[in-house]
Amino acid sequence: MLAVEYTPFYFPAGVIFGGALVAYFALCERQRDLIKLGLLMAACAACFPAAIFAGLRAMFFLHAHGASQDTQAPLLSFGIAGGTGTFLVVLTALSLFGSRYGVRYVLVCSLFGALGGAVLGVLGGMAHQRSVSGADLKLTDSILIWQPGTALILGLMLKVQRPLEHSSGNP
């Protein structure tokens, strides 16, 4: 059975990541709506437990259907976790601070962001994967890859929509 090392680092990691994004939106984007900033902080704090839950559920599903720890099942689980977390962050940030183009646009951007997050999750999984069967998985390596990568994905998603807004005459 695959053991996951539990540390109280996961939740604060989401709060720290959320704090960095809130600081960016408050200082650089001059967002002053405290409710929106608080919602972004809450979503970032919740994305880590949600991602871990999704990754563990995927791992249990894969093991129940015959996948062993020697296969790519752990990396797939990290990919699902990374995609889940990135989807939640991008969806929340674009909904609050981004697109004026509607729900469909935000969902499409969030799904593309989730694909990038899945790649980041796999890279994070590869960074800490051990060759010993039954290894304890330390998610801190994945977090250090996932956080800056997700921030980059979010920045790219915001950048993609802003030329559209400027070209359409919106300030």
Image: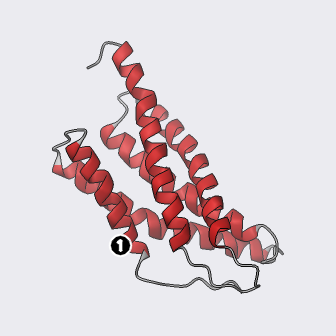
Residue drawn 60% across and 68% down? 55
Q: Is residue 74 left or right of residue 38?
A: right
Q: Disc 1 marks which residue?
A: 12
Q: How is the protein colored in the picture?
A: secondary structure
Circle 1 sits in a helix, a strand or a loop, which is it?
A: helix
Q: Does residue 100 sit above or below 151 in this rendering?
A: above
Viewer-closest of 68 and 12: 12
Viewer-closest of 39 and 151: 151
Q: Does residue 168 sit above or below 159 in this rendering?
A: above
Q: Position of residue 98 (x, y in %)?
A: 35, 36
Q: Position of residue 94 (x, y in %)?
A: 38, 40
- The total of numbered circles placed on residues is 1
- Amino acid tagged 1: Pro
Residue drawn 59% across and 47% down? 116
Residue drawn 56% across and 78% down? 138
Q: Position of residue 107 (x, y in %)?
A: 49, 40
- The part of the image, by quadrant, that contains residue 74 is bottom right
Quarter in which the C terminus is drawn: top left
Residue drawn 25% across and 52% down? 23
Quarter in which the N terminus is drawn: bottom right
- The part of the image, by quadrant, that contains residue 130 is bottom right
Q: Residues within 10 Å of mark 1 (few under 14, many from 20)?
A: few
Q: Position of residue 86 (x, y in %)?
A: 50, 53
